[in-house]
Amino acid sequence: MNNIIKIDKVSKSYGSLKAVNNLSFLVKEGEFFSFLGINGAGKSTTINMICGELSKDFGSIEVCGEEVDGNNTSLKEKIGVVFQDSLLDKSLSVYDNLKIKASLYNITGKDFLDRYEELSKLFNLKEIEKQPISKLSGGQRRRVDIARAIIHNPSILILDEPTTGLDPGTRKSIWKVLNNLRKEKNLTIFLTTHYMEEAADSDYIVILDKGTTIAEGTPLELKNKYASDTVYIYNVDEENIKKLDKSYKKVRDGFKIIVKDLKEATDLIIKNKDLFKDYEVIKGKMDDVFLNATGYELEDE
Amino acid sequence: MNKLISLTKRNIKVYFSDKKMFFTSLITPIILLVLYVTFLSGVFKDSFINAFPEGFKYTDKLLNSLVGGQLISSLLAVSCITVAFTSNLLMVQDKAEKTIKDINITPISKFTIGLSYFVSTFISTFIVNFTVTIVCFIYAHFFGTYMNINDMLNIVLDLLLLTLFGTSLSSVINFNLSTQGQVSAVGTIISAGYGFICGAYMPISSFGKGLQKVISFLPGTYGTSLLRNHALSSSFREMRNQHLPEELIDGFKKAFDCKIKLLNNYVSINSMYLIVTGFTLLFIVIFIFMNKHKKRS
Ligand SMILES: Nc1ncnc2c1ncn2[C@@H]1O[C@H](COP(=O)(O)OP(=O)(O)OP(=O)(O)O)[C@@H](O)[C@H]1O
Ligand SMILES: [Mg+2]
């Protein structure tokens, strides 16, 4: 697979604040790529540089083999962006907004109507098409944002927190559409999100802190490295748990033992068959990866 | 070209559908209209009557045509500039609300974007002012006027010129603004100040000498004066027909800013056209230059 986005030693400062600091990473064609980091880590800043809206101070940003400088018209045809804040014209209707943006990609007349019909079906726009953006609910607006971002059939779709604030049903339906697009059109997805379960499905993850990569890898690699597995054991005496010689915590009806990985869990259970009557093993989650990688203490549940 | 047209259409649509923006731009013309109806027209009438020679039998029609001409020219002089400024503020608002980002990521050149703001400001301003003009003509028709087609066409031509002037001036001034605060500041200053400076509330000729001098260096003043000349010339023609002395008519012209002194000489109508056109072209050149040399943040 080709590298479709190449970020090489990129830096960007706002005054004395280094928003992005010597950042490097690669995104492969057709990949579902997640770009994670706490608030203010520099995600949106990086996205603004990738789509040419913001200039970089140092380094190089290549998209589809072309260095981004803000004027690459051919590149702009290939990138679709859902910005963190919806940027449509609030006083204009859904239909007008899409029509205007389509025309800026030279999609007009019948081409537009056909495309609009497709998107309208995909995102259920029919019943809201005449409403001005300002009157839409958050979820409705996000649907329009995404329709807008893919109106020109881009090969890279950049999503800056596309589902923040949406109910689980809406989130699910949005992801269904996006996943279909990935399968059908080999769309590369570049996602920023604070919902770790969304990132868990991605092919590759980069975690950012203070403008630099602090962890990267596939979800599995990251889980192995940053998330420990947990064994819960119920209805036993604390005396017996102490004998296991592992650090543990008391939870309701039982105890929680942190193990490095599944192998350690299996060994532990096999060695103490008699003790482990009522137990469960929970695999580390992306949440743990994120919290551990960004240096947050794991809270007790 | 298609992109320019659709972006221009978008700008115009946003301007007319953004109620806040649209109504702020009409505030000054409306205030002026209210002032005329309640107060100013009486003041002007009195001053006209006092200026007529002893024993001259003036008709209501003559009076009304003078007051009407004064109103039309004031209204248009003000709204050409204020409406241009406020509709051009869309360019700033797009930056402040970041809407421009969603346009910048499309394959359209920065230059086309700049041009679309210019064209849309011109069109929006012209639509508003042309409507105002038509209403004024209808008003004049019922209240009494001696205007013929020629006078009207001259007014429409002034309107075009002044709209273009306002568009180019506001494009240059607004170009580097980028926040909502600046939008309101510029909007307020222009709406509050311009009516005064162009002599809409009180003729420039009644200001102090120093202020008159300063105002005579502002190119917009000559646009106002063109409008005054063309809105009042039919009344002056009628005064001549009624055998009023030429000195009196000349006094009227000076008193109502049809004649303006620049460096101690009265400026001819042709020079007024030249000044306004020249500055418009200058601003357009500056605007193009700024667009070409714009840097990304
Ligand atoms: N236009 C700007 N001017 C000055 N500082 C800025 C600007 N935009 C962003 N910053 C700063 O740069 C840093 C990175 O911001 P950025 O928006 O990239 O973060 P983010 O990772 O997208 O955060 P979030 O998850 O909250 O969206 C922050 O400290 C922010 O305050
Ligand atoms: Mg962000």
Image (cartoon, coloured by chain):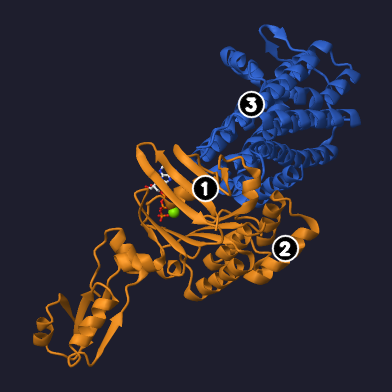
Chain colours: A orange, B blue
Q: Is label 1 within 8 A of ligand 1 (CB to nearest ligand atom)?
A: no
Residue that appears at 67% across and 29% down: B168
Q: Amino acid at mark 2?
A: Arg
**Element type at mark 3:** helix
Describe residue A44's horizontal placement relative to residue A1 as left or right: left
Q: Residue furthest top?
A: B264
* Residue at which label 2 appears: A115
Snapshot quadrant of residue B162 = top right
Q: Position of residue B43 (x, y in %)?
A: 67, 29
The answer, for residue B250, to whether it is visible in the render is yes
Snapshot quadrant of residue B57 = top right
In the image, B242 versus A183, the foreground residue is: A183
Q: Nearer the viewer, mark 2 or mark 1?
A: 1
The subunit carrying tag 3 is: B
Numbered label attached to residue A61: none
Q: Amino acid at mark 1?
A: Ile
Q: Are marks 2 and 1 on the same chain?
A: yes
Residue that appears at 20% across and 91% down: A273
Q: Amino acid at mark 3?
A: Phe
Numbered label attached to residue B289: 3
Q: Is label 3 within 8 A of ligand 1 (CB to nearest ligand atom)?
A: no
Snapshot quadrant of residue A155 = bottom right
- For label 2, count other residues whose C-alpha is less than 10 Å away and answer few (under 14), some (14-19) or many (20+): some
